[in-house]
Image (cartoon, grey):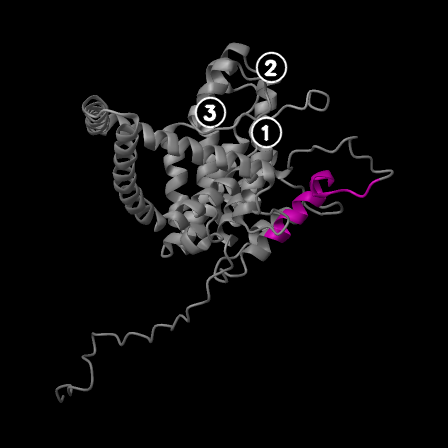
């Protein structure tokens, strides 16, 4: 038997098959992965399948066509799994066939009974498949997890669990949200991560300041219900912003600009206070030197004409020096003027999407909110119960 040639592999070494070439697909539209995570959380927990029903008077099938929230359970589930299939189109190698098959059993006339436990099991299996698919794309993975976690924050707390609500806004929870918002990058619409992150911060401050009052009022009270209702609405607004919903505008209204102006004025006061606290010796020395100079001028000169002439000279010198100093400061600040304007606009955008609970605030609570840059919402006494 002849020895194998160099071009022929030994008999015991299998020839590996050619690996399939994976053609990279274009990234899905911004907000897709986030919306997918939000929807998966709602499919797994049927309490979240309905948005907050705020229709007044309540929906009447006899005279109104139903909104999504008014659909019966079977039609609503059909609507949601149809949306799920559309969201999964960019991820062509992830199949939702088993979830679709289980959801079809919910429809009237189905030969097989619908089992909610089996449906949840298939949703969980699909969730694991999505995580595996997104493992190599950190931005998409962050956006997907953000959708899950933000849905939990807005839907898991209830009026009967004040502690669970405050726990959702702990520092570590908010830090995790901020991490996913920052890590989502281009997987969410541009600039929305920073806007929603600041809005989350305002909510965390509000909950922190009002936690003692809510605990004292007790679970299940009107105050707790108001806070939970506001949180549900806020969740829907955050979802719309992070999915580039055209029905939600980031163009600030006048009230949002007022809050942004207050925030900028508060920032200036804080910076001024810090400068005075740290450099007060320099300010005192300068004022003392100026006072001494004026005293010497007035004490050593005779005649009103000489005194006023000297004062005008001193004022001109001080003014020229001050003008030079302030001119230099103005030139230095001129370069950051554009950044200040962007910060003010972003603050106004944050307040245009922030929906805080409208409950009565005491004077001390209002002062604390103001010091943290959180505006207490106006209460319409004749419209809000």
Q: Is residue 80 magenta?
A: yes
Task: State the SS at label 1.
Answer: helix
| Residue highlighted by disc 1 | 230
Q: Is residue 13 magenta?
A: no
Q: Earlier in the sequence, mark 3 or mark 2?
A: 2
| Residue highlighted by disc 2 | 221
Residue 370, label in figure = 3
Q: CA distance from mark 1 to mark 2?
A: 14 Å
Residue 173 visible at all: no
Left or right: where 20 falls relative to 160:
left
Look at 57% across and 33% down and name the residue there. Answer: 355
Residue most toward the top? 216
| Residue 217 screen position, x and y as percent | 55, 11
| Residue 4 screen position, x and y as percent | 15, 86
Q: Earlier in the sequence, mark 1 or mark 3?
A: 1
The quarter of the picture where the C terminus appears is: top right
Q: Are marks 3 and 2 in contact (CB under 8 Å)?
A: no
Question: Mark 1: few, some, or many residues within 10 Å (few <14, many ≥20)?
Answer: some
Which residues are drawn in magenta?
Answer: 64-83
Q: CA distance from mark 1 to mark 3?
A: 20 Å
Left or right: where 179 falls relative to 157:
left
Q: Nearer the viewer, residue 337 or 78?
A: 337
């Amino acid at each position: 038997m002849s020895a194998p040639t160099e071009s022929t592999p030994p008999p015991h070494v299998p020839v590996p098959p050619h690996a399939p070439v994976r053609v990279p697909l274009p990234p899905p539209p911004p907000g897709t992965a986030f919306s997918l995570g939000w929807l998966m959380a709602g499919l797994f927990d049927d309490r979240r399948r309905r948005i907050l029903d705020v229709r007044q008077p309540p929906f009447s099938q006899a005279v109104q066509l139903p909104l999504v929230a008014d659909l019966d359970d079977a039609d609503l589930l059909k609507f949601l799994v149809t949306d799920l299939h559309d969201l999964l189109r960019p991820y062509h190698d992830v199949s939702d066939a088993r979830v679709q098959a289980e959801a079809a059993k919910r429809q009237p006339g189905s030969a097989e009974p619908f089992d909610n436990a089996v449906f949840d099991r298939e949703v969980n299996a699909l969730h694991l498949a999505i995580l595996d698919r997104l493992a190599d794309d950190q931005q998409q993975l962050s956006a997907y997890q953000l959708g899950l976690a933000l849905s939990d924050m807005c839907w898991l707390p209830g009026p009967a669990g004040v502690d669970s609500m405050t726990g959702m806004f702990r520092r570590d929870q908010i830090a995790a949200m901020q991490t996913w918002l920052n890590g989502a990058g281009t997987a969410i619409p541009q600039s929305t991560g920073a806007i929603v992150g600041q809005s989350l911060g305002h909510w965390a401050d509000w909950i922190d300041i009002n936690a003692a009052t809510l605990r004292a009022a007790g679970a299940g009270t009107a105050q707790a219900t108001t806070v939970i209702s506001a949180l549900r609405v806020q969740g829907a607004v955050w979802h719309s912003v992070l999915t580039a919903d055209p029905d939600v505008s980031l163009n600030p209204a006048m009230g949002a600009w007022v809050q942004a102006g207050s925030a900028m004025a508060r920032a200036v006061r804080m910076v001024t206070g810090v400068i005075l606290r740290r450099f007060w010796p320099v300010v005192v020395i300068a004022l003392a030197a100026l006072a001494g100079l004026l005293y010497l001028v007035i004490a050593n000169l005779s005649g009103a004409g000489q005194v006023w002439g000297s004062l005008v000279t001193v004022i001109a010198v001080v003014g020229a020096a001050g003008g030079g100093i302030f001119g230099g400061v103005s030139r230095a600040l001129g370069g950051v003027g554009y950044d200040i304007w962007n910060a003010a606009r972003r603050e106004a955008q944050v307040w245009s999407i922030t929906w805080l609970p409208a409950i009565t605030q005491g004077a001390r609570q209002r002062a604390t909110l103001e010091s943290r840059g959180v505006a207490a919402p106006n209460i319409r006494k004749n419209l809000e119960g």
